[in-house]
Amino acid sequence: MECREIFDQVKEQLTQEWKNYYLDQVFRLAYSQIDTFVYANDVEKSRLNQILQSFTYDQFVAMRSQWLLKGRMLWYAYGNLTKDQSKQIVEQAIQLTGLQSIPKDELPSVRHVDLSHHTQNFHRLDFTVQEETNENSCLVSYYQYGLDSEAHGGRYDLLNQLALQFLQEPTFDQLRTKEQLGYVVFSRPRSSRDVLSAWFLIQSPGKNCEHIRKRLDIHLAKMRTKVQNMTDEEFKTVQGAVMTTISEKDKNMKEDF
């Protein structure tokens, strides 16, 4: 098979994958947008597709000649490996690739966006579902707390997990069972690059996002009072649930990170 033919096939496959990405279930699509919104220099699939359409085989060949000449490798060693064995593997890889190191300040920045810069500490981002027959609306409400520094010793991270554990069942019960906004109701803590946050996701087939946001705000205002008045027995129940979660072994490398 000719290289140009392989290029055309891969280009067509990526084009279709990135197009189909926007036809996924609304709540999955909404959740996947979190990284796009909170990471600096993250690129949406639609923008990648636009770039790919004008990318030619001749451009690919020109770029290929510079591929893996310069860069930086980041290694994680897992399993039955000693420190010396790990270092040996890395040194062999460096020799085989002949990779020329790139200065750290020339690498692209992949960092969280600081949402506190807005005067009201509030940002609204809207996107339209491309599938016209899809009548679902989905709200993702994302709250960023800030950094969990070494000085805190992980305490803020645990506090975040405790708070979201306490909120999880009442949020589902109120918005899903009692108010019946929709079948999909999630609330979870989030920790990425030492930035602590929480997110709430509600998908509704009959209510728009403004209505969902209003009901969520009312619910969280009530829960704020309940958190402040939490009994020792309630705290021990929440504490036990969090301890069970963090004591579970990671099922794969992604969870370990």
Image (cartoon, rainbow, N blue to C red):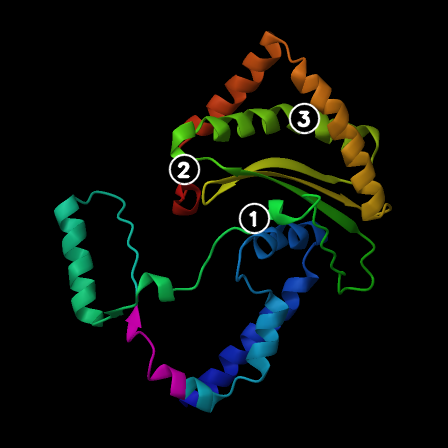
Front in this rendered view, residue 3 or 207: 207
Distance between mark 1 and mark 2 Cα atoms: 29 Å
| Residue wearing tag 3 | 169
| Residue wearing tag 2 | 250
Q: What element carries label 3?
A: helix
Identify the amino acid type marked 2. Asp
Which residue ends up furthest to the front in the rendered image?
Answer: 119
Distance between mark 3 and mark 1 Cα atoms: 29 Å
Q: What element carries label 1?
A: loop
- Percent across and percent down for residue 172 are 72, 31
63 in the magenta segment: yes
Identify the amino acid type marked 3. Glu
Q: Looking at the image, is 110 positioned above or below residue 245?
A: below
Marks 3 and 1, the one that precedes in the sequence: 1
- Which numbered circle lies on residue 114? 1
Q: Can residue 1 be seen in this view?
A: no
Marks 3 and 2, the one that precedes in the sequence: 3
Q: Can residue 180 be seen in this view?
A: yes
Q: Give the range drawn in magenta.
A: 62-71
User: In percent of the image, x 80 and y 47: which residue is there?
Assistant: 209
Judged by depth in the image, the label closer to the viewer, 1 or 2, is 1
Q: Are marks 3 and 2 in contact (CB under 8 Å)?
A: no
Identify the amino acid type marked 1. Asp
